[in-house]
Image (cartoon, rainbow, N blue to C red):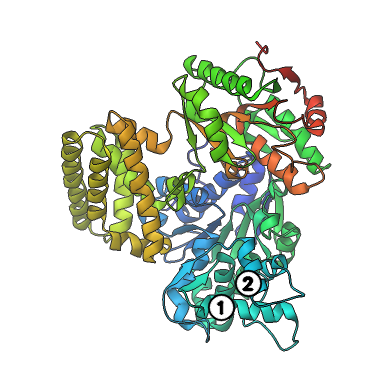
Amino acid sequence: MTRVSTEDWVPQGVGDLENRAWEALRQNDISVLVTAGAGAGKTEFLAQKATYLLQTGICPAPKRILAISFKKDAARNLTERVAKRCPKDQARRFDSMTFDAFTKGLLDRFRPALPEPFNAPGTYQIVTPFRRDYEDFIERHSYHRVSAQQLEKAIPLADLPVDISSGSEINRALANYWQEQLFGDDEISLSFPMINRLVKLLLQENSYIRRALQATYPIVFLDEYQDTTYAQYDMLLTAFDGSDSVFTAVGDDKQRIMGWAGAMNDAFDQFENDFEARRITLLSNWRSHEDLVRIQHEIARRIDGHVEQARAQGTREIEGDISAIWQFRSIDEENNYLAEWVSREVQSGRVEAHDVAILVRMRADQVEDEIAPAFTARGLRIRNAARSIGEIQIQDLLGEELTKIFVPLLRLGATYRSPDNWALAQQSYMFLEAPDPDSDISQERLLFKLEAFVGQLRAEVARSQPAADSAEAIAGMLLEFIGSATLRQSYPAYQRERDFERVWRGFVTLLKECAEHSSSWTEALDEFEGIGQVALMTVHKSKGLEFHTMIFYGLDNQTWWSLTPQRDEELNTFFVAFTRAKQRAFFSQCVERGSSIGWIQQLLAPAGVEVIDGVNNG
Ligand SMILES: Nc1ncnc2c1ncn2[C@@H]1O[C@H](COP(=O)(O)OP(=O)(O)OP(=O)(O)O)[C@@H](O)[C@H]1O
């Protein structure tokens, strides 16, 4: 086993860390709260810290690190970075997952240990109820003093079993709601907030499970900590109550955009108190260049008057405007201009199509219908990340483990030289098969099997033209080789058949769709991954991502009506979206749709962002 001394350890994959990041990295006896603005490398910092702790043996075998992220992409990204940097036996001890995957994993493993009636036998389905479902429930039971909104808000906060001794109507409604979800006519139906409550109860009632969890994870990371909900925090406190586990939380309170979903509004202070944590603030911005950082700072100041300006570490690569509000007279003019502009930029080689993102407030499907013809006419395709393929959105599908395992294999099938995909395929396969790390023979045997399969896949791919039926057959070969049972055993998120089927069906459907449009398998796979396509997404979905060029589409007071500086969350959302840009961020607005948003113009004007005539902007 390779070990590096703490003095000799150096960051990997990046040049260096800023001094304060070094400080936070070496802080291992007490918990730390790393706060920093956009692009400060918070997620990267966690990847470095995990690497440091594993490589130096500060986290020795068999101890593990638990990293909790909000998005699947982020969780997967962390796993990949650590896997690239650490030997296998170390990387396997890094468990990176979303909050929901963490709680669901615990529930699926230990459900029988819940007290009655919460250990009800039978499978369960995960549901995401809408407000009208709660309204329907309230109406059916004739609760007069409880609203649907109150019930919805109370579910994540109420401990189980719900105390009905006081006779309060909300508690009676809650208890009844649980009863119906567990013992109604259909299959047991649980939402993620309900799963959270069940896991809290499980951990509270079972000191054995709690102690096992604490012994396994002496180190816990929390990414995007600002969006932690009260319920999630409460569950964590229960899980690690009385433990010596050391926490590292990273976050930016200006990027708090999940208040509507119950995110804590005093998360940072609470963490400092409860975990006796030291707060360390990072100052760099590695993503954006100086001129963009100056504009970002104007927005940041509006959110927090005391915020320090970040030190831009990115290099400006383009000349001309880096930000402006383009005004158009009609929707047609706007769409044609944007398509023309993006097409020119892509053709000139200044930016790749998939490094351009068009951001909308909501209804991405409708906007796709509106703008796609102008882009298609210029040979550009739009990748609407929010489009649903069966029961899963494209952006989520691309972040799924199944996709991350199958796509490199498909790439290997479609091309003869692809060392990166070979490395990814090998890494996934070894993870799934988990050969004895001390046995060279079993590892070699597996590699041989993988090579043989890739050979077969290549032959099949070479034999068949891309089309719906051939895509389905090839996807079937992949599943047969990897094995659905292996996948489902390896990932808690796939343990239940219907969860697995949802992703698998989405994967096959999108692959078929892409194959039908393409003249080669490489083209089909590029289309599948959105390579060479202009990204279209909602501002919320842009969180955690980055693009060379961003265009905020249709920024008028009708479409972006809710964007007001009086609502913290909306301003934060705007900040999150704006800070995704590495090189430039433009706004498009047209009078046909609504009038301009005065306060945004006033906010951005001091940083030199002007309103200009879209068509004649040169
Ligand atoms: N020390 C570093 N040196 C060079 N590049 C870095 C460093 N740290 C991070 N980066 C790069 O800077 C970009 C932003 O990093 P990262 O996504 O980790 O930031 P973040 O603080 O989590 O961002 P945000 O909160 O805005 O989502 C990424 O492209 C990352 O690879």
Evaluate whether residue 52 shows in this view. Answer: yes
- Left or right: 529 as drawn, with respect to 423: right
Front residue (pair 330, 325) = 330
The image quarter containing residue 340 is: top right
As drawn, the label of residue 141 is: none
Q: Residue 38's x, y, as percent? A: 66, 40
Q: x, y (%) of residue 181?
A: 54, 75
**Quarter-wise, where is residue 451 in the image?**
top left
Cβ–Cβ under 8 Å for marks 1 and 2 = yes
Q: Nearer the viewer, mark 1 or mark 2?
A: 2
Q: Which of 549 and 19 lies nearest the eye of the viewer?
A: 549
- Which residue sits at x=71%, y=67%? 274
- Which residue is labeled 1 in the image? 180
Query: In which quadrant is the C terminus drawn?
Result: top right
Residue holding disc 2: 137
**Ligand 1 shown in quarter:** top right
Q: Position of residue 11 (x, y in %)?
A: 52, 42
> Mark 2: which amino acid?
Phe
Indicate the amino acid at tag 1. Answer: Glu
Relative image position of residue 156 (x, y in whole percent): 64, 69
Q: Which is nearer the eye, 495 or 425?
A: 495
For marks 1 and 2 on the same chain, the one whose residue lies earlier in the sequence: 2
Separation of marks 1 and 2 at Cα, in angstroms: 10 Å
